Each structure stands twice: as structure tokens, then as C-alpha cells.
Image: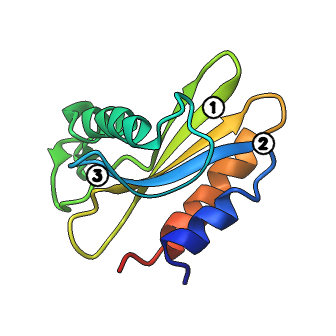
């Protein structure tokens, strides 16, 4: 099971990967970064993407639905798996990581639109998020 550094190295092996980070969305801090940052500052990017993750994770519209279609909050983790933001030249993928504690971590991948494969990247991020070990 890979730690943060190994996970980020694997993410950067994806075709079109420009940069990646592991971010705590409650604090907005980057726990690890690699490659380029869209605005040239990994810490600022972590804070900005954490705001998107936080807004998404806390919306009742994305809550789990119970047996009869009613919203439920059985689990303390977010029911959202990932968020994809499309720009004119790239994709930003935020993949939430389930953890034993508070599940407030996500993987952020900045993917070049012309060189990347969105479906492959989404699948691979999901696999890495499941295997990521946070120490």
C-alpha cells in the first residue's frame, strides 16, 4: 500500500499528468505535491481546491439516499467519490479518500486535456485512493 509520496509518483505516470497533490480539505493544506501547479503555487492551489471539495462534500444534494429515497447520514464520510472540473486546456480531478478517521483528504490531479485520458485517470485515481496509506 503506497504512502503519499509513492501515490503521487504513480499519479504522475498517467498520460497527460501535469501535477498532483494530496490535500486535507478541512484545513486546505497540501500533505504532498508533485509536478506543476496551475497557478505556480502548490499551497495556494491546495487551498483553492480544498474550498471546492469542502463545498461539494457538505452539500445536502449529494447526501446518501436511504431505502425509501430519504436522505441519511449513516457514515461520517462524504458520499461524493470525485469532482471533475473542465477548463479549456485541462481537467482537475478531486478524488476523495476514505480513511479510518475523518475522511477529509482528497487527491487532486491536474491533467492536460489534449494528452490525458479522463476515463483512465478517473479509474486509476480511484484505485490509488483505495490503496493510499496515510501515516
For image coordinates 43% across by 36% down, the residue present is 45
Residue occupying image coordinates x 25% and y 59%? 77
Residue bearing the label numbered 2: 16
Q: How far apart are the two marked residues, 2 and 1, measured between alpha carbons?
A: 10 Å
Query: Which is nearer the N-term, disc 1 or disc 3?
Result: 3
Looking at the rendered structure, the secondary structure element under dot 1 is strand
- Residue at 39%, 42% (x, y): give it: 43
C-alpha separation, residue under disc 2 versus residue under disc 3: 28 Å
The answer to which of 50 and 84 lies nearer the viewer is: 50
**Label 2 neighbour load within 10 Å: few <14, some 14-19, many 20+:** some
Q: In the picture, which quadrant includes the N terminus? A: bottom right
Numbered mark located on residue 91 in the image: 1
| 119 on left or right of 80 | right
**Crowd rating for badge 1 (residues with CA inside 10 Å; few <14, some 14–19, many 20+):** many
Q: Position of residue 15 (x, y in %)?
A: 81, 48
Q: Which residue is label 3 attached to?
A: 78
Amino acid at each position: 500500500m503506497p504512502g503519499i509520496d509513492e501515490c503521487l509518483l504513480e499519479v504522475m505516470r498517467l498520460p497527460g499528468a501535469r501535477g498532483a497533490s494530496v490535500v486535507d480539505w478541512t484545513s486546505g493544506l497540501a500533505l504532498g505535491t508533485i509536478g506543476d501547479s496551475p497557478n505556480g503555487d502548490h499551497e495556494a492551489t491546495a487551498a483553492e481546491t480544498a474550498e471546492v471539495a469542502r463545498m461539494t462534500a457538505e452539500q445536502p444534494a449529494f447526501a446518501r439516499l436511504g431505502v425509501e429515497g430519504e436522505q441519511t447520514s449513516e457514515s461520517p464520510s462524504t458520499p461524493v467519490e470525485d469532482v471533475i472540473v473542465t477548463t479549456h486546456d485541462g481537467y482537475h480531478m478531486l478524488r476523495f479518500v476514505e480513511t479510518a478517521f475523518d475522511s477529509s483528504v482528497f487527491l487532486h490531479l491536474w491533467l492536460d486535456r489534449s494528452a490525458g485520458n479522463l476515463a483512465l485517470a478517473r479509474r486509476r485515481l480511484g484505485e490509488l485512493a483505495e490503496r493510499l496509506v496515510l501515516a
